[in-house]
Image (cartoon, rainbow, N blue to C red):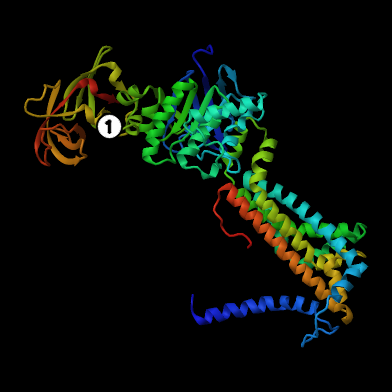
Amino acid sequence: MTTNDAMIEFRDVHKYYGDYHALRGITATIRPGEFFSLLGPSGCGKTTLLRTIAGFEGISSGAVLIDGRDMADVPANKRPTNMVFQSYAIFPHLSVEENVGFGLRRDSRSKEDKAKAVIEALEMVGLKGYGKRAAHALSGGQRQRVALARALILKPKVLLLDEPLSALDKKMREQMQVELIRLQRQVGITFILVTHDQEEALVMSDRIAVMFEGEIAQLADPETLYRRPNSRKVADFIGTMNFLPASIISESAASVEIEAAGFGRIQLEPGQVMGGATAEGAAVGFRPETLTILYEGSAASDRESMATIEEVVYFGDMTYYDVRIDGSETNVRISMRNVFGRPVLDRGERARVGWSPGALVLFR
Amino acid sequence: MKSPGFRAYTIGYLIFLYAPIILLPMFAFNDSKVIAFPLQGFTTNWFREMWADTTLWNAVRNSAIISISVAVISTTLGLFAARASTRFRFPAKAGIMGLIMLPLVLPEMIVAMSMLVVLLAIGIELSIFTIILGHVLICTPFAVAILSSSFQSLDQSLEEAAYDLGETPLSTFWLIILPLVMPGIISSLLICFTISLDEFIIAYFLGGNETVLSVYIYGQFRFPAKVPAIMALGTILVLLSITLLAIAEYFRRRGIAKAGGKDSGGFL
């Protein structure tokens, strides 16, 4: 593999802590200049995997390559990576500029050049003029920015971010998400983000690796992950997905015919058929927004089913309906944008539900 | 909490604690060889007499050498032990740490006796050095206790961050860890110094011909004529202790303020 298409390469990486198998054969490639996320619930090994890139965590077997070079014998302080820690790890006894310039201590540049680099780095993260402040006097968001400037000043090949936004409040978090995307485009460095927040991963990433129990369950771009999750577990973890029991009637190389509760017979393309069913058996999955409640005069839908409205949750711009499609025994959720002039339906009302076979995924 | 009984108890407690200490300067300046009321008049003769006593100066010199050595050695050992116990996992850790901390509860008498027996058996001459050995043994647990709390409040990712930014483990220790645990180090130095300075049993058992301050003071009480000078010496020691504690507290608070931490007690 040439350096052009792999900034980071994991080759069958295993990690044991005593008897505990934390990483179970990770094989993946992260491209140069990519915003890559490791997404998963706590304890899935995503932080451990990130730390194997940084060099804080050794691996039991396999190989981690950065820019084509095996990192087996390279200690953390010699790796072309820098990290933004979950706690930010701002040195409390140093000023903002001393923190940001910390990595330049071993640099051969002149004092003036280093000072200039610090000022530029602070400007880049929107902290112009904060250099003389004491680090402990900063707010959470400002610390975050100092940590970013400190990591980026060394111009690493890869920036590692360990749940960097989890300590911020919602508004600040959303603002920092946008700024991180902008920053990544500006510096063009490979960013690797660890997060348990699926929304954050979808918003920010070029590609996402979803991890469960030390393994990568699916590695794909956000849209594929959302629309075509390869297992019910991934589908459950990312956003909301409805499931209805289904059974396969017939299958050929070109299509699969199934029978799903409430939907009847449906022809699916092979790309819509995934493994990863749960013990309950095969099921079709679909996102709440792929179903529509049809009103008088609505545009016709591919397919229609009749349903009873069981629950209504009004959100202002949206209404969530939990409906029971005739012929099925479980409720499914439909999200509808509230449009002026269209009434919000009540519990117990009957409704026509429109859907499209293309939006379904079969887990078998 | 505002009941009159509680107030009386508090006042009584403080009097019981500090009245004897207040007597020291009173009799140190009292113009009489007898330690008794009523006071006779003001004099600074006792300070002059004390100052001229060469055995006292010898004891002061010995005590200074011992206490400073003990403070430095115990704090250094404590630094290693505290670092190891907070940062690393190793076999039999609880047992090893328990053995290090044991002298804290071990009667000093036993430590002094057993050390005396062993030192005599292997033929080491009793001297300042043997006192230092004994004092290091009893001071190290205090150093470990103080420094462990400093290390525990240290975010481990600070070290990783420094390492990540290109520093070696050694320079990380020097640039990040040491400055951040410095208040603990100063505390430990002062506490160990103070414990060693006023320790009596070990200094008495293991001192041989060398006299330290505490042993010297005890010896002087046999001569009633010397007692007022001891009062003068005591007065100076009280002032010295208060000054040292004030300095320690100043550094501790400054350290916390600098690190942006929250003040959670301390010794003062």
Q: Position of residue A120 (x, y in %)?
A: 53, 27
Mark 1 neighbour density, 10 Å: few (under 14) some (14–19) many (20 or more) = many
Q: Between residue A143 and residue B140, name the one nearer to us.
A: A143
Q: Between residue A26 and residue A166, name the one nearer to us.
A: A166
Q: Position of residue A178 (x, y in %)?
A: 39, 29
Residue B262 left/right relative to B233: left
Q: Chain of mark 1?
A: A
Residue B91 left/right relative to B233: left
Q: Identify the secondary structure beneath mark 1.
A: loop
**Quadrant position of residue B171:** top right
Q: Which residue is denoted by mark 1 in the rendering? A: A241
Q: Is residue B250 above or below residue A134?
A: below
Q: Residue at 50%, 32% (x, y): give it.
A: A128
Q: Residue at 68%, 61% (x, y): give it.
A: B246
Q: Between residue A345 and residue A276, name the one nearer to us.
A: A345
Q: Residue furthest front?
A: B42
Q: Is residue B128 above or below residue A58?
A: below
Q: Is residue B90 visible?
A: no
- How many discs mark residues in the rendered view? 1
Q: Position of residue A82 (x, y in %)?
A: 56, 28
Say which amino acid is labelled 1: Met
Q: Residue at 57%, 80% (x, y): give it.
A: B9
Q: Is residue A136 above or below residue B237?
A: above
Q: Residue furthest left?
A: A296
